[in-house]
Each structure stands twice: as C-alpha cells, then as structure tokens.
Image (cartoon, helix red, strand yellow):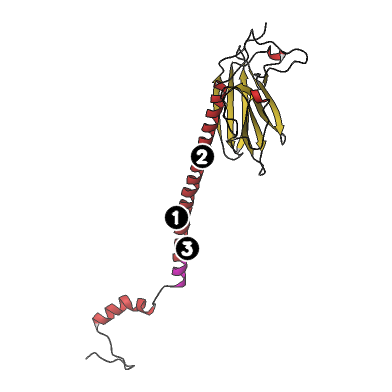
Amino acid sequence: MRPINKSGCRIPDKESQTLYGIFGTRQLQKGFTLIEMLVTIFIFAIIAATIFGSYNSVFSNAATIKDDMMAYEMAKSCLNRMILDLQSVYISLTPAYSSLENDEEPDPYRLVGEIIYIDSTPFPRLRFASLSHLPFGAIKQDGIAEIIYYVRSTRDGKYTLRRADNLILYGPAEEKEHDPILCENLKALAFKYYGSEGEAVESWDSEAEEFSYATPRAIEIKLVLGNDERFQEFKALVILQPYRDKAE
C-alpha cells in the first residue's frame, strides 16, 4: 500500500514519480499548438511553391524548345525552296540580250530586287525567272516561270513570306491571296546582292543602266523569325549560275 498525504491522495512511488516527471507534462498537452501548426503550414507552402516552380520551369522550357524547333524546320524548308529557285534562275545572255530601248517590252527574264513598305516597315520584293516552276491548279506543264517573293501582313499584325509562280508563257505573274506561304511569323527579311567586283547592295535591277544591265553574281538571304522578345536568324548565300556581265 502506498502512503496517503494530508489531502487524502496516495503518494506515488519513485517509479511513478519518475515517469510522471518525464511524460506528465506532455500528456496534459495533447495535439499541436497553434504556433506549431503555423510553422508546419509555412514549411509546406515553401516546399509546394518550390516544386510547382520547378515543374512550371520545365514545362515552360519544353514549350520554348518546341517553338524553336518548329521555327527552325520552317526556316529550313523556306530557305531550301528559295535556294532551289535561285539555283535554277534563267537569264537572257549576250549577245542575244539587248538592253531596253524606248517603249520596248522589258526583258521577261529580268531580275529585279526592290524595297517596299508594309505598314511603315521595309521589306524586300524579289522578281526573277526560273526553271523551278511548281505546277499548281489546272496547268500542269513545266517551263520558265516568273517567281516573286513578297511579304504580306496578317490580321494579327504579323507578317508572312509568300511565293508567286506563273509560267511566263501565260503572261506576268500576279500576287494572289492563295499564293503559297513560305514561312510565317516573319520578323525581318533582307536580300543582299553581290556584283562582279564583290560590291553589295540592297536592291538590283538587271534592266537599269545603273547596274550596266548586268545580273548579280550572288544573292544573300537573311531570314528572321519571331518577335522583339525572342527571335531566330537564318542566312544563306546563293551563287547564281548563269549570270550576265556588265554591258560595255
């Protein structure tokens, strides 16, 4: 029997006193305090935010990489088409060629590169003759075609590069709404024309006395896709064969 104190309660033995001293206080405080709960929630929020940020970064980078790959493939296809067209260029050669005089019709195989403005933005327009005709529509025959590269704006304020293609036999080519689109999301386009002495200019006219009725030896293409925040630049240099020397 354990002894009884003055208040009538039994006095715990030494073993019970020891256990009470260790666990008694904790047993009275069942559960977590408000501070402990708040600290737990705060730590969990930090961990969740870190994990969410990591996943968000991964998915964002994946989307960016996908967009870059699509832009690269589109630019590659566009440049391949333009290189093939220019490598198949058809030019009137001397002595059969004679410079334009008076009211004569311009040479149907002339090469003209000019700068035009679309929504106050300068873009090049290139016209030339080529054996690289793509037969669309009802006419399925091959031949020498007049090809025009030109830029058009879209409703959302972006630009597209288009390709007009018409057999010279059937008259001059016209820029139509259904002309094939070479590339979309165009930020900038530039052609640089190189003469026989290596000089580079941004425009050319093989029917102009300024260029001595010659054609360029090479054309450099610069293509920029994207926007002001993120864009990709592509370049290609095409050596023209054949070409016409300056008239003496």
Range of magenta residues: 31-39
Q: What is the spatial separation of the Cα atoms under label 1 and label 3, in whole angstroms?
A: 14 Å
Q: Nearer the viewer, residue 200 or 93?
A: 93
Which type of secondary structure does the marked residue at label 1 adopt? Answer: helix
The image position of residue 153, as x and y in percent, is: 67, 38
Residue 242 forms part of the magenta stretch: no
**Would you say the residues marked 1 and 2 are in contact, meaning their CB atoms lie under 8 Å apart?**
no
Q: Quadrant of residue 185?
A: top right
Earlier along the polypeptide chain: callout 1 or callout 2? 1
Quadrant of the image containing the N terminus: bottom left
13 vs 104: above or below:
below
Residue at 65% x, 20% y: name it. 111
Residue of label 1: 51
Residue of label 3: 42
In the picture provided, is 160 more to the left or to the right than 55?
A: right
- In the image as oriented, which residue stretches furthest toward the right? 102
Q: Nearer the viewer, residue 198 or 6?
A: 198
The circle drawn on residue 70 is 2
Which type of secondary structure does the marked residue at label 2 adopt? Answer: helix
Residue 37 forms part of the magenta stretch: yes
